Image (cartoon, helix red, strand yellow):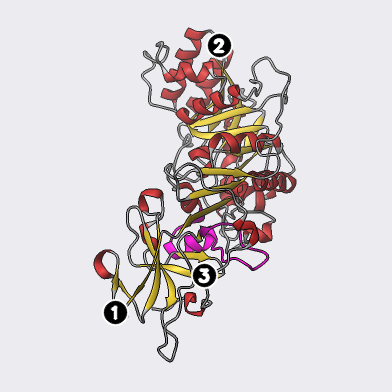
Amino acid sequence: MTTSADSAATTPSTAPEAAAARPPLPGAATSCAVIDLEAIAHNGRRLAQIAGVPWMAVVKADAYGHGLGPVALTALSAGASWLGVAQLAEALTLRSVLDEAGVARPAGEPSGRAPRVLTWLLPVMDPSRAGAEDSPLRAALAADLDLSVSTLSQLEALEAAARLQGVTARLHLKVDTGMSRGGAMDEDLPALAAALRRAVDEGTVDVVGLWSHLSRADEPTSGSTEEHLTRYRQAERVVQEAGLRPSIRHLAATGGLLWYPQARMDLVRAGIGLYGLSPDPAVATSAELGLRPAMRLESALVQVKRIDAGRAVSYGGTWSAPTDRWVGLVPLGYSDGVPRAASSTGPVGVGGVMTTIVGRVCMDQVVIDLGPARDGAGAPLPAPARVGDTVVLWGAPDAAGREAVPTADEWAQACGTINYEIVTRLGTRIPRRYVGAGAGGDYARP
């Protein structure tokens, strides 16, 4: 097997000046994910410009692996009026982050002065226990969260918690428009809408939102999104007939807001695009969309060695050196989130050399090919990289062309997956280092 490392220079690589000037990695860490918060802010503003309506920064899964707190605050500084997370535990953590940062809570604030937080996967609760002191639903209501409901049992539990606390729960009714995942089904919606209307009349809930999720928004020619829109409008009529008038209709995540103007409605949810990645690079790349990837995963070579032709590398001996080779050891593995599917295929940049992982990805380390150890005449070649040289697994392309930088899209293609998985699976063992002018920034305050 040969790689682009075959064309590597025969002298030690020289990292670009910008890379050489980087501060050392945090603590004793050898690897680091560098998160460009200015890129996050740029992407948020760019998506808002396209959408033309208020936007939610989706910061679930630790902000797609980029770091919940810093990304949330940066998104608010860039104009987000909503923050969204999937799980209630994430939402409670996020509320604590916002409180500590001095971000005003929405309760009692004039409209638009404080960001709202929506969470949509609630724990299963027995309504008789929903009002208990240790109930997570009581914690949710105390944290001024907007909550999503799709079933009568969810509504009953939330009503019980709201009654005991003497508060009104802010709810978004989610309907299933074709994803066949979360959301109320057509046959269940009339009864749920009627129950919501009764709860509104009692004062235990306020139905502020009607929402759903598109299953194929990254496939503009599929016809699927048009079907979703039809089902959404049908659901909206059922809800209105029950006497409910949700003021916030939202359907579009990044793909929908980019490619379906009719799906933008009152609010859009910026997820993968906020992090500078395209929902489908085959339709339009990040660069074509005006987005900037925000995560750069880098490490350092901890060993460089020469191996003989035919020598097997890593577990199972699945890759053998086609010639005498220079190889390097990188202290990242599948426990850090490097997919095992990247074995003998994951792209890696070392200075000006683009190469790949060779052999199987191990738990804590990978081996990369650094190129031939002998020239065509059989004379020895010096190692093209040294211990301590920076290794980049993925990041923003190097516009100056001085550095080899694979992209998350290239990693996704190599591993047979999507860029979402590449960045979100990055483990907590990898420190995040935040860069970018105004990192954290100013955000909406009363």
| Location of residue 205 in the rendering, given as x and y in whole percent from the top left corner | 56, 17
What residue did someone put label 3 on?
Answer: 354
Dot 2 or dot 1, earlier in sequence: 2
Callout 1: SS:
loop
Q: Which of 213 and 96 is in front in this view?
A: 96
Indicate yes or no whether the magenta region holds residue 398: yes
Where does the C terminus fall, quadrant-wise? top right
Q: Do the residues labelled 3 and 1 touch (CB within 8 Å)?
A: no
Would you say 304 lies left or right of 119 here? left
Which of labels 2 and 1 is toward the front? 1
Q: Do the residues labelled 3 and 2 touch (CB within 8 Å)?
A: no
Is there any visible trace of residue 321 in the rendered image?
Answer: yes
Q: Quadrant of residue 357?
A: bottom left
The stretch of residues the image draws in magenta is 392-419
Would you say 333 lies left or right of 63 here? left
Q: Which residue is drawn at 42% across and 12% down?
A: 131
**Label 2 amino acid?**
Val
Dot 3 or dot 1, earlier in sequence: 1
**Label 3 amino acid?**
Met
Callout 3: SS:
strand
Callout 2: SS:
loop
Residue 310 - label: 1
Dot 3 or dot 2, earlier in sequence: 2
Is there any visible trace of residue 207 in the rendered image?
Answer: no
What residue did someone put label 2 on?
Answer: 167
| Location of residue 210 in the rendering, given as x and y in whole percent from the top left corner | 59, 32
Q: Distance between the residues labelled 3 and 1?
A: 22 Å
